[in-house]
Amino acid sequence: MRIGMLGTGDVGRALGHGFIALGHEVRLGARDAANEKAVAWARENGAKASAGTFADAASFGEVVVLATLGVANESALRAAGQEKLRGKIVIDTTNPLDASGGMPPRLAVAGSDSAGERVQRLLSEAHVVKAFNTVGHAHMFRPSFPGGPPDMFICGNRAEAKQKVGALLKDFGWGVIDIGGIEGSRYLEAMCLVWVLCAFSTTPPTWNHAFQLLKK
Amino acid sequence: MRIGMLGTGDVGRALGHGFIALGHEVRLGARDAANEKAVAWARENGAKASAGTFADAASFGEVVVLATLGVANESALRAAGQEKLRGKIVIDTTNPLDASGGMPPRLAVAGSDSAGERVQRLLSEAHVVKAFNTVGHAHMFRPSFPGGPPDMFICGNRAEAKQKVGALLKDFGWGVIDIGGIEGSRYLEAMCLVWVLCAFSTTPPTWNHAFQLLKK
């Protein structure tokens, strides 16, 4: 499958690497086609990896992954070109973190709205699925934990899109729990903060943890 | 230890039963001393169990547990008498659920405030610890899940209070993760909604699940 990745940060590069390892083609999109991190990533990740602009990545992808800073989602999607995402699955991995008051961050959007819902409103003809937002980049691909695999909570308005994203998540090594429509992003973005705050439950902070849903 | 329980619903009775089973004394408080559920619960739970008003339970408890409907917290605490809770540990188990729009519910308080923070503001001289709010009443005491024990996420402003509540939680059968100050309630109350929405990820809905934090 062709994956368009919007964002060249830790999350974009880690997910891009995972998709490449699973045999997919990935174009890593940046604001600037000459973005050094994107060009270096493409060089390191072989023939199925390429770099380009946000618009290049959006055109390239059958599935497009939004991996920008949550507070930059709107400008990234406008740069990508909303019309290029029409009818496509867009995986929203973002959290609207505001670290202007120091660490730990807060949510810049919360309560009766969320980044996920905003992305779906901006891309009214795309099928947005919230995923990968409740764990750090180091454990997104092939998460390995005693007692694992961990579970990824996802939401979105279109069942077919969630099924496809769920299959990708299983390939990545996750259990998958579908919590319903995109408004569930309100709760999953807050859960990201629980994940962040868990890091500070140990001294020094550690980021090697992931959620699992125990069932019987 | 003497436990004052504010609330006679499923949560109050289940936690009360757990404390009794661990050898503590429990007074189950209701708005009305003749509350039939409280009187019946006390009769069924032996010599260490008693029933009374919110004020009776607040006076009785060395530790007081708030187990009312989240949207009724303020009136319950005013009926209990805020002065009776001065200097005590108050375990806030509540979620400000609003089911007026049908199921699943929404949060009546969210974003930059939470039920836990409101309780701490109302009881400025008590030591409020958020706990037991991310699982259903059926699994609060001795949770038994394959791959368990599950983890309870707690928060509060006073380390000593969280240590005591953490010890009680371990007696109840939980792993304990301290996510910091009481403002973490914003995220834990949202996480309750993830727990609720997970119920609807199966058809028919099932409520036999609990969170665990995998670590390495």
Image (cartoon, coloured by chain):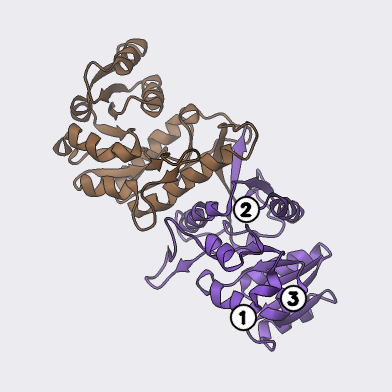
Chain colours: A brown, B purple
Q: Position of residue B118 (x, y in %)?
A: 53, 64
Extreme residue in the bottom direction: B34
State left or right for residue B145 relative to residue A192: right
**Residue that label 3 marks:** B59
Mark 2 vs mark 1: tell me if same chain.
yes
Secondary structure, mark 1, is helix
State left or right for residue B164 relative to residue B122: right
Mark 3 vs mark 2: tell me if same chain.
yes
Task: Pinpoint the chain carrying mark 3.
Answer: B
Task: Pinpoint the chain carrying mark 1.
Answer: B
For the point 36% across and 27% down, which residue is it? A12
Task: Pinpoint the chain carrying mark 2.
Answer: B
Q: Are marks 3 and 2 in contact (CB under 8 Å)?
A: no
Decide which of tag 2 and tag 1 comes sooner along the chain. 1
Q: Position of residue A161 (x, y in %)?
A: 30, 43
**Residue that label 1 marks:** B79
Q: Are marks 2 and 1 in contact (CB under 8 Å)?
A: no
Q: Based on the displayed image, in which of its 4 quarters is residue B79 positioned? A: bottom right
For the point 82% across and 65% down, which residue is it? B1
Q: Nearer the viewer, residue A40 or A124?
A: A40
Q: Position of residue B172 (x, y in %)?
A: 73, 56
State the quadrant of the C terminus of chain B: top right
Q: Based on the displayed image, in which of its 4 quarters is residue A19 positioned? A: top left
- Asked if residue B41 is positioned above or below residue B122 in the image, the reply reads below
Secondary structure, mark 3, is helix
Report how far apart the C-alphas of labels 2 and 1 lie in the structure: 24 Å
**Residue that label 2 marks:** B157
Q: Position of residue A31 (x, y in %)?
A: 23, 26
Q: Residues within 10 Å of mark 2 (few under 14, many from 20)?
A: some
Q: Based on the displayed image, in which of its 4 quarters is residue B61 positioned? A: bottom right
Report how far apart the C-alphas of labels 3 and 2 lie in the structure: 23 Å
- From where the camera sits, is residue A181 visible? no
